[in-house]
Image: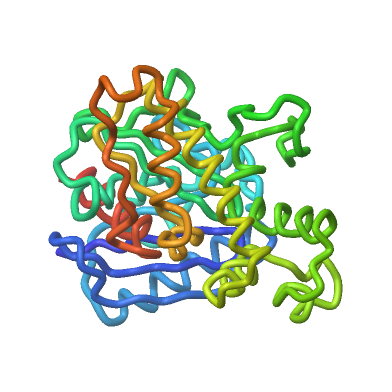
Amino acid sequence: MPAIGVDVGGTSVRAGVVDEQGCVLDSARVATPGSTGALEDAVTTVVDELRSRHPVDAVGLAVAGFVHPDRRSVRFAPHLPWRSAPVADRMSGRLGVPVTLEHDANAAAVGEHRFGAARGAGIALLLAVGTGIGAGLLLDGRIFRGAHGVAPELGHLRVVPDGRPCPCGGHGCWERYCSGTALAATAVELLARRRPRSSALTRDSADQAEITGRRVAHAAKEGDGVALAAFADLAHWLGEGLALIADVYDPDVVVIAGGVAESAPLFVDEARERYAAIVTGAGHRPLARVRTSQLGDSTAIVGAATLARERTR
């Protein structure tokens, strides 16, 4: 029987009915509300909408936050109201079916490993590059969680001492230089430094606050010089991070997912070249395959549903 995967994000709650081949048969979406009760109502709404059309026997929730290793409670989610909340038990009681929780990047990694770009890899790492960087690591198909369930928090590796401030409280975190947010910040810095006579970014934006990663990507695809330079900077920092990750984990494959992955032709080849040039032992060791997601924005939904189905067996 199919299972439902729900990607609970800071902007929207997206759900899909997923079969055993990893195909999304149907989907539903609502905006993410700000209170605990309203959020759980929203999850119930999308699940019930799909259950009205499909028989299912399990639900998996992919959450952008710290999930307890037993996958029953959410310890902390920066963009959601849950704090030390027994979400799985509460939602299972409301829905009447088993509910499994998982960190969204872990769920995405499982989706790509079972059905996508990391299929069959012994050591697979997924990087969800969007507003920040989320990461999921699979060792022989099993999720690596660390001692306390929060690993691997790669987006907050410090790559630039005393660099850009990060909402985590640190400075110079990797995701401040390699993310959609970083694209916008780099473009703003380049505009201030270069003061170009003409740029699509200044024509389309009344002020710097309107420059977003999505706008930078659109401008780069149109050939805008500042936007292309921002992507070159992102490629540099992605390559730097890949080299660091390779030295620590030595993965078979790294899958680039998330919203920024939609612009992969603008940066992935350059990032691979940077990684290959600076990794320890460059030229004398095998390199990880660097691929982009095959499941797109359904990756976490597919992974969450798959984990929920496997846990009920």
User: Looking at the picture, does residue 166 appear above or below residue 187?
Assistant: above
Tell me if I can see residue 2 in this picture: yes
Most foreground residue, 292 or 15: 292
Q: From the viewer's perspective, is 33 left or right of 259?
A: right
Most foreground residue, 271 or 136: 271
Query: Which residue is at a point 70% across and 77% down the rendered structure image?
Result: 200
User: Looking at the picture, does residue 26 appear above or below residue 130?
Assistant: below
Residue 176: x and y, percent? 66, 43
Quarter of the rendering occupied by the N terminus: bottom left
Q: From the viewer's perspective, is 60 left or right of 263?
A: left
Quarter of the rendering occupied by the C terminus: top left
Q: From the viewer's perspective, is 293 left or right of 20?
A: right
Residue 247: x and y, percent? 39, 20
Residue 309: x and y, percent? 22, 52
User: Looking at the picture, does residue 147 appear above or below residue 209?
Assistant: above
Most foreground residue, 173 or 103: 173
User: Looking at the picture, does residue 296 appear above or below residue 286?
Assistant: below
Q: From the viewer's perspective, is 3 left or right of 239?
A: left
Residue 76: x and y, percent? 61, 39
Query: Which residue is at a point 73% across and 74% down the rendered structure image?
Result: 199
For residue 11, what is the image quadrant?
bottom right
Query: Which residue is at a point 41% across and 54% down the rendered structure image?
Result: 257
Most foreground residue, 286 or 246: 286
Tell me if I can see residue 89 in this picture: no
